[in-house]
Image (cartoon, coloured by chain):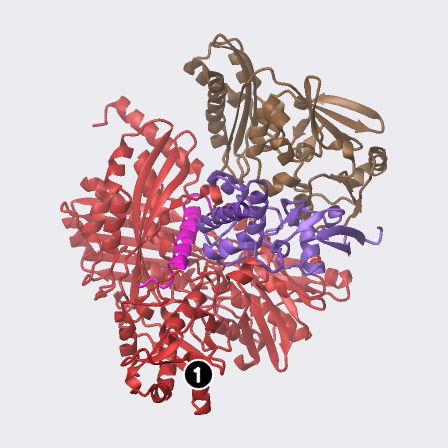
Chain colours: A red, B purple, C brown
């Protein structure tokens, strides 16, 4: 009987033939969703419920002097107002450092910051009430630009000595030497912007008073975090707070951050007033007040030698944290440690700064700090190749991480590095060479181009931050299997993948298995983020299912008249390896076990082994493994208008074992759409910290006509030794290189490079025009070679 | 009428409905809050996302921009009304089969728009499909599988017509 | 959430006119509702009465009255776009409406509602301007017909009087088959115009006999580009001539910078799309 988790995982890693792993099983939640009966937070609406509506700051930086709620009290007897003063516990919800209140108390730090909740029996009345809350402010000077904020005397958090929340650092080799040996150097500054998650379902939670606390149903990504924060805000124990996930209408990281806050807001009302309470954000509330992808400035210098090898990089990354630290320390850390791209580089120096400003705070968003820095890396790679007179894809192949390579942080990659193969395959499939040559010759109003970009993404939490998998599986007397995991289903399809994992290990049909996920009744499995839901989340399920099989083996052996080690589970039957024609039905075995008083539940736990990281040098073990991605993009640019149309994308993914190819395709296609929006059109318009476009009229996300043809992904199954069947993470991958693949293709088409996203038609038009003008000028002056 | 309650009568998924509404309520709120039809989703409330799409006399409309009293005498169809006798509509089957469902929030509206398309044009081109659903935003799928699902359903409907 | 108001639905035209006569200041007419509900939600208008005209039969439909196309103000965008009569007689309008918002909105929004809302970026005002349309109004005081050129006064402002109802949109059947409609937005579809251009022209022996050019989203109201029109009148249509003419468009427009584009970009795009529209229209004569 094998109990060593490493050996059990290794057994499945080496398995070649599967029943359900690798199949495009239909989603377990699809039926409810096509019937319209899936229950999202707002669908819990019922009479007798209270509704909270958000009062937001009208100042970007000010002291709150007085909050006058008399208008609301006149509106209706049933209306009430909750402010910071009404919080029974601790008004502190900061994720990494305690700098953020649930409701602003003495001071507001960004325009749109939550100050109060107006509560009424009718949601419209609550909304009406928000207009009647009058707040007297004492305005303070604001700082909006992160570069200015570094040295500014204006303090977003006056108790802190500086607006710099955190500095990160990684250095390796000797960059002075590296650069002096370089034959070509490229140095530029890149700017990226806020991106709104724009999930179609806005943030929300509904809370019900329970015997000694509250029960909360939320649009969340981590029930246990929501539980912790809610308990802290209410001043009660976590045992008094139960959190269950509703069906979630899109999350993408945003609800990892916002979910707990909304849970706490709804719970506050329900707990204090003893009635069910719902808080949902309007679209405007959401776009003004919820966290977004960190805007960034990346100053990047890189050098390469004539033979096409990267010799050194130097980068300075400034992340605009907005008013609170939230996830910024983690996104910046990730950006820093990924700042080389998936390439070998002997000499490197990377510095990161997270800086407070008086704007909406940053947060988790698919890619988590990585997209801004990979945009810089991949633009630089193209420019280096051009200076060397090399094909940009061949240049990448010369430097790409391979088995045995060391990363920027000097982490040795012992296995599971499939990006080189992915890149070669993408080159073939996209007909790269021919298109590169053909498109160069094009002329006319519309020109085509093809570009490539790579990406990598550490799976699981960073450095030594503990990461684990945990799951509980129970089998009932009818043979039905319930698997409990804290991992949430947020639309990505992970619970369907989990069913496949359990089905494969127990050898039973998928319809016998139900995933009870996203609840504090399940073991704490960590958050559904960092592309870990399937990869890390699946490990515990394998181990729990293996334990259950072991519990049943003796009984099975007796019934099959064989030894325990000869017992096999498959296709809903249990049989002997010695004489497979002899078998017993799954249900009969379960019944027998019940009779023999064998308890049929088991927990699977696995602590991911992690190495050491030297914070001083920024060197060492960064992540248990990395997933890799290549996107080749083909575009057409209308030179008259600057409008870019992405025609086609060839994705190639090295994410270990593909558990469910249909769901993986869904992740690839969806992430490309978000990356395309980020690259070309999505833009939060801010004036003095005020969001000017809190709606889908002017915050544009891709429609059907903006989307390219997306080729079937190339999969390089570079198995990860601890992943379930070798699986790594997928969800975030395709977003990461999409902006740079598009931008590199635009450069190929037009000869103009965008270094500040998004590349709107207007921005590209001016860039192309000024390039043309300077060429004309050079010709006239005879300075052109 | 001065009391702020307006009687409105219409057909919802083939059945007559008679209910009171606030004059300033939207069809979206009437359906969700008064009639419990929660499949109609609130996404933006300004007619930009299509999540609240319903069919009004067979044509897709966004219910967040329809004043509830104005549906007097009309026929409203929501996702609850498109499966016949418990049998899924070919579009619902195709959405499941093609993997066109992720978070599911856009799904009811998306299927309703697609249904209106196929009712009028059982054999739409790729362009016609894109045009029909361009007002139904989806943030999860990149539309690829949604378009495939509509193509699949179109084939299904045609072949079942031939066999009939 | 919408502000509070009362809802009235007159069944007959006379009823509607007398209601408006009495409550002209506090009323807003609802047609498709796609603009009005957004404005009310944003608190930009707070009427006491919302008057639903959908009960008035004579306000719908598209028909040909001798040589004039008559469109009822409550005809929806989709109805007009798909009308065989419009496709045949005024294909430019049909093409412009194809690019208008998206299907759901087209099934709700009406031509009349869109015109009376007077958005400078309207995608249907420009073709109607280029087609020299006229508008007929009714009130208790009687009837009034004005050219559409005199209708728009500024963003959200029109020549309609408070007691009047837009009763009919009249388009003289275009003589020429040469037309073009071009629209530019920040994304490929379902988007507000940064600039849109409608062109209708007549050519005789490679000379421009007549050109009607209208632009949207580049001035406080949709505008005719008289400078370009006059420049090309009777001119030979060489590439150079068209380019020179197109550059004149900047004198006819007065764009602002907003969330969608800068004034400078709008100017350049007006020139580019004017040139493209003239050429597109000419190309129609070649096939």
Percent from the top left, x then y, of residue C82?
A: 61, 32
Q: Residue furthest bottom?
A: A596
- The answer for which chain carries disc 1 is A
Q: Is A677 included in the stretch rendered in magenta?
A: yes
**What is the magenta segment's predominant secondary structure?**
helix
Along the viewing direction, whichever of A770 and A540 lies nearer the viewer: A540
Query: Which one is nearer the viewer's eye here, A246 or A577?
Result: A577
**Where residue A102 sits: x, y (%)?**
56, 67
Rendered position, A243 above or below A675: below
Q: Is residue A447 left or right of residue C169?
A: left
Classify mark 1: helix, strand or loop. Answer: helix
The answer to which of A516 and B152 lies nearer the viewer is B152
Task: Locate residue C57 relative to residue A495 in the image: left or right.
Answer: right
C132 falls in the magenta region: no
**Image quarter of residue A439:** top left
Category of crowding for the residue at label 1, using alpha-carbon neighbours closer than 10 angstroms: few (below 14), some (14–19), many (at least 20): some
In the displayed structure, does residue C124 sit left or right of residue C271? right
**Residue nearest the observer in this picture, A42 or A656:** A656
- Can the viewer see residue A146? no
Please tell me how many numbered marks the rendered image carries: 1
Q: Is residue C176 visible?
A: yes
How far from the left and from the top, in percent, is residue C231?
Answer: 52, 13
Q: What residue appears at the point 69 percent right and 35 percent down from the top-left corner?
A: C113
Residue A613 falls in image quadrant: bottom left
In the rendered image, the vertical position of residue C128 relative to residue A667, given as above or below: above
**Residue annotated with mark 1:** A588
Where residue B39 sits: x, y (%)? 61, 58
For the record, the magenta segment spans A657-682
């Amino acid at each position: 009987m094998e109990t060593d988790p490493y050996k059990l995982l290794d057994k499945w890693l080496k398995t070649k033939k599967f029943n359900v792993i690798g199949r495009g099983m239909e989603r377990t939640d699809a039926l409810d969703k096509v019937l319209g009966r899936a229950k999202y937070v707002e669908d819990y609406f019922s009479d007798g419920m209270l509704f909270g509506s958000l009062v937001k700051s009208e100042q970007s930086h000010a002291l709150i002097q007085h909050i006058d709620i008399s208008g609301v009290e006149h509106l209706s007897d049933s209306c009430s107002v909750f402010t910071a003063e009404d919080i029974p516990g601790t008004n502190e919800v900061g994720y990494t450092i305690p700098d953020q209140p649930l409701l602003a108390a003495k001071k507001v730090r960004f325009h749109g910051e939550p100050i109060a909740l107006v509560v009424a029996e009718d949601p419209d009345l609550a909304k009406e009430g928000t207009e009647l809350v009058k707040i007297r402010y004492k305005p303070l000077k604001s700082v909006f630009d992160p570069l200015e904020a570094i040295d500014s005397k204006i303090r977003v958090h006056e108790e802190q000595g500086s607006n710099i929340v955190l500095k990160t650092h990684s250095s390796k080799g000797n960059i002075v030497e590296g650069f002096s040996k370089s034959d070509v150097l490229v140095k530029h500054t890149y700017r990226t912007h806020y991106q709104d998650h724009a999930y179609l379902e806005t943030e929300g939670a509904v809370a019900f008073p329970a015997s000694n606390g509250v029960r909360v149903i939320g649009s969340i990504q981590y029930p246990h975090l929501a539980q912790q924060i809610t308990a802290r805000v209410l001043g009660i124990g976590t045992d008094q707070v139960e959190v269950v996930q509703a069906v979630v209408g899109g999350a993408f990281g945003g609800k990892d951050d916002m979910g707990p806050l909304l849970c706490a807001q709804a719970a506050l009302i329900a707990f204090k007033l003893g009635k069910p309470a719902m808080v949902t954000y309007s679209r405007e509330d959401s776009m003004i007040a919820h966290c977004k992808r960190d805007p960034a400035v990346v100053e990047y210098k890189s050098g390469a030698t004539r033979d096409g090898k990267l010799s050194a990089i130097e980068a300075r990354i400034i992340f605009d944290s907005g008013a609170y630290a939230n996830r910024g320390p983690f996104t910046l850390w990730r950006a820093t440690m990924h700042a080389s791209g998936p390439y070998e580089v002997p000499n490197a120096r990377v510095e990161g700064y997270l800086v407070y400003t008086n704007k909406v705070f940053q947060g988790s968003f698919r890619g988590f700090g990585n997209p801004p820095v990979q945009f810089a890396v991949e633009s630089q790679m193209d420019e280096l190749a051009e200076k060397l007179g090399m094909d940009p894809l061949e240049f990448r192949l010369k430097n790409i991480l391979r088995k045995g390579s060391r990363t920027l942080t000097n982490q040795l990659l012992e296995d599971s590095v499939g990006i080189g193969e992915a890149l070669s395959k993408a080159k073939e499939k996209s007909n790269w060479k021919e298109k590169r040559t053909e498109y160069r010759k094009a002329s006319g109003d519309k020109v085509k181009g093809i570009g490539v970009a790579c990406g990598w993404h550490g799976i699981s939490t960073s450095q030594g931050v503990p990461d684990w998998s945990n799951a509980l599986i129970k089998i009932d007397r009818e043979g039905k299997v319930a698997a409990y995991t804290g991992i949430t289903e947020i639309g990505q399809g992970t619970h369907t993948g989990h069913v496949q994992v359990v089905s494969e290990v127990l050898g039973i049909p998928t319809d016998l298995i139900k995933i009870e996920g996203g609840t504090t009744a399940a073991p704490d499995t960590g958050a559904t983020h960092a592309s870990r839901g399937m990869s890390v989340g699946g490990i515990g399920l394998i181990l729990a299912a293996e334990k259950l099989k072991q519990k049943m083996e003796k009984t099975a052996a007796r019934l099959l008249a064989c030894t325990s080690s000869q017992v096999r589970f498959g296709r809903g039957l249990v049989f002997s390896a010695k004489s497979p024609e002899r078998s017993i039905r799954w249900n009969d075995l379960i019944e027998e076990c019940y009779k023999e008083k064998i308890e049929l539940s088991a927990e699977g736990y696995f602590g991911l082994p992690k190495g050491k990281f030297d914070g001083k040098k920024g060197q060492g073990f960064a992540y248990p493994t990395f997933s890799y991605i290549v996107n080749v993009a083909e575009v057409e640019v209308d030179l008259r208008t600057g409008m870019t149309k992405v025609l086609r994308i060839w994705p190639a993914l090295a994410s270990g074992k593909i558990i469910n190819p249909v769901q993986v395709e869904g992740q690839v296609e969806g992430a490309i759409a978000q990356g395309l929006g980020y690259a070309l059109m999505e833009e939060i318009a801010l004036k003095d910290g005020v969001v000017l476009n809190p709606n889908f009229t002017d915050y544009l996300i891709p429609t059907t006509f903006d989307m390219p043809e997306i080729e079937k992904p190339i999969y390089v199954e570079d198995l990860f030794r601890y992943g379930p069947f070798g699986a790594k993470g997928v969800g975030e991958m395709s977003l990461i290189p999409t902006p740079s693949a598009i931008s590199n293709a635009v450069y190929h088409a037009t000869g103009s490079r965008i270094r500040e996203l998004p590349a709107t038609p207007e921005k590209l038009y001016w860039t192309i025009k000024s390039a043309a003008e300077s060429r004309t000028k050079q010709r006239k002056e005879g300075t052109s070679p | 009428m001065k009391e702020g309650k307006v009687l409105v009568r219409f057909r919802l998924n083939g059945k007559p409905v008679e209910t009171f509404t606030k004059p300033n309520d939207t069809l979206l709120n009437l359906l969700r809050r008064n009639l419990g039809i929660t499949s109609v989703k609130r996404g933006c409330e300004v007619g930009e996302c299509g999540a609240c799409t319903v069919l009004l006399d067979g044509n897709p409309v966004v219910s967040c921009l329809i004043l509830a009293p104005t549906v007097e005498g009309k026929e409203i169809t929501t996702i609850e009304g498109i499966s016949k006798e418990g049998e899924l509509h070919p579009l619902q089957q195709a959405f499941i089969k093609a993997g066109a469902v992720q978070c599911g929030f856009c799904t009811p509206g998306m299927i309703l728009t697609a249904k209106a398309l196929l009712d009028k044009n059982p054999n739409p081109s790729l362009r016609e499909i894109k045009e029909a659903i361009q007002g139904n935003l989806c943030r999860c799928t990149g539309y690829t599988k949604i378009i495939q699902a509509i193509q699949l359903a179109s084939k299904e409907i045609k072949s079942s017509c031939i066999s009939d | 959430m919408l502000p509070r108001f009362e809802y009235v639905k007159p069944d007959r035209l006379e009823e509607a006119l007398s209601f408006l006569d009495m409550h002209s200041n506090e009323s807003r007419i609802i047609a498709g509702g796609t603009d009005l509900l957004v404005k009310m939600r944003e608190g930009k208008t707070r009427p006491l009465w919302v008057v639903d005209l959908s009960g008035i039969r004579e306000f719908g439909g598209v028909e040909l009255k001798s040589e004039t196309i008559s469109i009822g103000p409550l005809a929806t965008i989709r109805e007009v776009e798909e009308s065989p009569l419009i496709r045949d007689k005024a294909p430019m309008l049909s093409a412009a409406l194809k690019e208008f918002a998206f299907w759901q909105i087209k099934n709700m929004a009406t031509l009349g509602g869109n015109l009376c809302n007077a958005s400078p970026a309207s995608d249907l005002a420009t073709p109607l301007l280029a087609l020299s349309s006229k508008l007929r109004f009714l009130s208790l005081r009687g009837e009034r017909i004005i050219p559409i050129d005199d209708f728009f006064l500024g963003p959200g402002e029109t020549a309609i009087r408070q007691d009047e109802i837009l009763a009919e949109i009249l388009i003289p059947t275009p003589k020429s088959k040469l037309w073009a409609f071009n629209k530019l937005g920040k994304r490929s579809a379902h988007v507000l115009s940064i600039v849109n251009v409608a062109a209708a022209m007549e050519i005789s022996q490679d000379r421009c006999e007549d050109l009607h050019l209208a632009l949207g989203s580049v001035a406080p109201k949709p505008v005719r580009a008289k400078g370009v029109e006059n420049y090309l009148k009777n001119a030979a249509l060489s590439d150079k001539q068209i380019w020179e003419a197109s550059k004149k468009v900047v004198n006819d427009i007065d764009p602002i910078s907003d969330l969608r584009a800068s004034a400078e970009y709008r100017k350049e795009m007006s020139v580019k799309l004017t040139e493209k529209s003239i050429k597109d229209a000419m190309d129609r004569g070649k096939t």
